[in-house]
Image: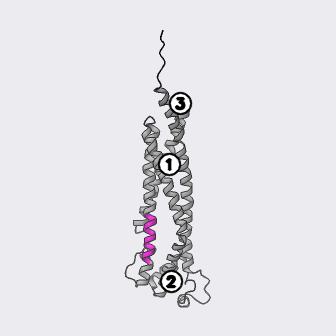
Amino acid sequence: MAAWTLITRSVLFFLCLAMLLAALALIAVGFWMRYDDSFDTDLKNVVYQFNDPKVLADAKFNIRVWLIVVFWSIIGLSLGAAVTAIFGMISSIFVKRRGFMIAYLVLMIVLIVLEIGSGIAMIVKRSSLRDATNALVNSMYTTNSVKDIQIIQNTYSCCGAQNGVFNSMYCGPMSNLPYCDVTVFNSVDNTMMISGIILLVIVILQVVAAVVPVPILISKRYTIKYSYEPTEVSRF
């Protein structure tokens, strides 16, 4: 029994260690992508330009809201995963302190529920993201934002917008390039799909990490129960 408990605690410790390292790496990458000016400079200059006509400014604002919500959701879940992993590592070491194990399980269950909820919300909001990217690209052409158009077309190798009345001004009549609103959305959608797959793998690992300590808690409960059981004293 002691060997089995040691193996279970070791598995829990290394699962939580892997989750902690992944969470810290995700936080670091997220802040690097968000605040490092050398990363995707051209696209940041498009979205974070504030001296545009109202139609284009509103479209960019909607995209910025999307980026902020997604960014802080990832950071928040990553911080939650890091804290949960630390509790899990502590509970795997100080196994006699059942409070650490119980706190870890509660945090892990809450974290899994939040991650599943975030994934469902992203799927439900997918159509609104398409509308936001379409509105951004269309407003660039309707307001004749030449600088933004050049950046988008060069970055995504695209031209014009679906049903765009200004396509002939920016694209040649024989242009075979895809529409920019389609390529921009597909790029964002592919990124979300990859993120969703990674999130699914993480959730599966977290479910395993939530199940592993259950036998430890059960065995610990019976150990405590029997250790306090009164012994029968002989009358003779």
- One can see residue 140 in this view: yes
Mark 1 or mark 3: name the one nearer the start of the chain. 3
Name which residue type carries label 2: Asn
Taking the spot 53% from the left edge, 70% from the top edge, the residue there is 188
Q: Is residue 62 magenta?
A: yes
Name the chief secondary structure element in magenta.
helix
Q: CA distance from mark 3 to mark 2?
A: 66 Å
Q: CA distance from mark 2 to mark 1?
A: 44 Å
Q: Establish if 117 lies above or below 208.
A: below
Find the residue positioned furthest to the front.
Answer: 235
Viewer-closest of 127 and 152: 127
Residue of label 1: 18
Q: CA distance from mark 1 to mark 3?
A: 24 Å
Image quadrant assignment for residue 55 = bottom left
Residue 9 at x, y = what percent? 51, 38
Q: Establish if 34 lies above or below 130.
A: above
Residue 8 at x, y = what percent? 54, 38
Q: Which mark is residue 2?
A: 3
Residue 30 at x, y = what percent? 44, 62
Q: Which is closer to the viewer, label 2 or label 1?
A: 2
Q: Secondary structure at mark 2?
A: helix
Mark 3 or mark 2: name the one nearer the start of the chain. 3
* Image mark count: 3
